[in-house]
Image (cartoon, rainbow, N blue to C red):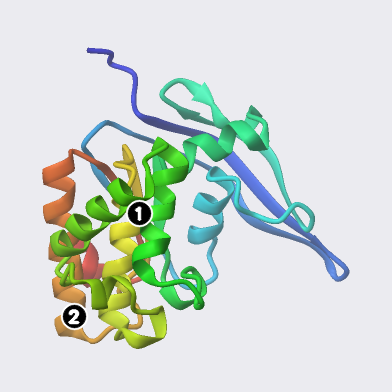
Amino acid sequence: MSDQPLLDVRNLEVAFFTKDGIVRAVNRISYTLDRGDTMAIVGESGCGKSVSVMAMLRLLPEPPAKILGGQVLFEGQDILKLKPSQMYTIRGSKMAIVFQDPMTSLNPVIPIGMQIAEAMQVNFGYRKKRALELTRDLLVRVGISGSRDQMMSYPHQFSGGMRQRVMIALAISCRPQLLIADEPTTALDVTIQAQIIQLVQDLQKELGMTMIWITHDLGIVAK
């Protein structure tokens, strides 16, 4: 087995070019992450935590954002040099992210089951029936009934904790090697926070994923 790390971020530098001047959001951040490891990116709000991973996933709007320098080696390949079409195949199938606010990430007019099934159809070419069967299993795995009523429900019909479980199901639907959790428990009460953290830990062990957890809460990091 190769000694090469799964992820090797080298001197990543990101800035935003605005009408008021240049905002340097990420200033030469570097780290490595081996397969199966968990790493926390910790810092105060606005320090560039989320921007650093959004740049890595090539999800920042350019302009105003611009990656000024550095490398992001994923399985030895610098993904900052990939074409958008090439990067599209990596996001979801190899790298996935769970955002802080699922309501801005889930489509409000498409049932949650259809959204998860579509991801598997696009990435794996599954037929709709097979994708829906796997979606039902995924929802059960993250603690949501796999009934037809639940699968055909819309995001607004779920609580905040349940929506976050849907986002986790969507993120792991294509069995990514790297899962990024961008403050996924910030808007949840303490009890639900603990449930989501435990769920992610259990799924990481079960699926053998590598994990990046972004937070400003050292209590969450300790867990």
Residue 103 in the figure: left or right of residue 174:
right
In this rendered view, identify the residue nearer to me: 183 or 202: 202
Q: Is residue 213 visible?
A: yes
Disc 2 marks a residue whose amino acid type is Ile
Q: Looking at the rendered structure, which numbered label has been put on residue 162? A: none
Quarter of the rendering containing residue 171: bottom left
Distance from disc 2 to disc 1, alpha carbons, whole Å, reads 19 Å
Q: Residue at x 18, y 71 (%)?
A: 147
Q: Residue at x 28, y 46 (%)?
A: 130
Question: Eyeballing the image, is 69 above or below 20?
Answer: above
Quarter of the rendering containing residue 157: bottom left
Question: Eyeballing the image, is 85 above or below 19?
Answer: above
Residue 89: give x, y in percent of width and height.
Answer: 51, 35
Q: Residues within 10 Å of mark 1 (few under 14, many from 20)?
A: many
Q: Looking at the rendered structure, which numbered label has been put on residue 171? A: 1
Residue 16: give x, y in percent of width and height.
Answer: 74, 58
Q: Looking at the rendered structure, which numbered label has been put on residue 192? A: 2
Q: Quadrant of the N terminus?
A: top left
Q: Residue at x 42, y 50 (%)?
A: 119
